[in-house]
Image (cartoon, rainbow, N blue to C red):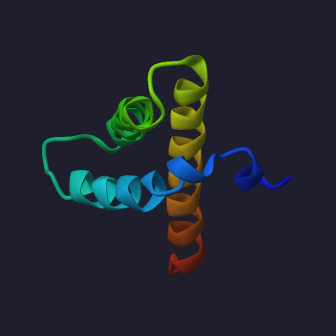
Amino acid sequence: MDLMKYVTEQALILIPVLYVLGIIIKNIPNIPDWVIPWIILMVSIVLSVLILEINVQAVIQGILVAGVTVLSNQLVKQTTKKK
C-alpha cells in the first residue's frame, strides 16, 4: 500500500515540518513521550486546515500527514537503534 498516493501535494510540506517539530518537542524535558504524537496530530490538523481550507478533506490530510511523520520517525529510530 502506497500511503503517499493518499496525501495531497499541498500537504506534503508538512511532513518535514512536523518531523522537526517532533524533534524539538522531544528535547523539552517536561513533555512525556506519549504526548508527542498527540501534539503532532493536533498541529498537523491545524496546519492542514490552514493550507487546504476548513473541510473534512483537510482534517483527513492532517491525520494522514501526522501518521506518515510518526511512522517515519519510528522507522528511523528502530532501524538505527543499537542493540
Look at 45% across and 20% down and name the residue there. 54
Q: Is residue 20 left or right of residue 15?
A: left
The front one of 55 and 46 is 55
Look at 65% across and 46% down and name the residue there. 7
The front one of 73 and 68 is 68
Residue 60 lies, in percent from the top left, at 60, 28
Look at 19% across and 58% down and name the residue there. 27
Q: Is residue 20 above or below residue 25?
A: below
Q: Is residue 83 left or right of residue 45?
A: right
Q: Is residue 15 above or below residue 39?
A: below
Q: Quadrant of the C terminus?
A: bottom right
Q: Is residue 5 left or right of residue 34?
A: right
Residue 30 lies, in percent from the top left, at 13, 42
Q: Is residue 2 above or below residue 33?
A: below
Residue 11 lies, in percent from the top left, at 52, 47
Look at 58% across and 36% down and name the residue there. 61
The front one of 28 and 52 is 52
Q: Count of labels shown?
A: 0
Residue 62 lies, in percent from the top left, at 51, 35
Q: Is residue 77 above or below residue 8?
A: below
Q: Which residue is most to the right? A: 1
Quadrant housing residue 16? bottom left
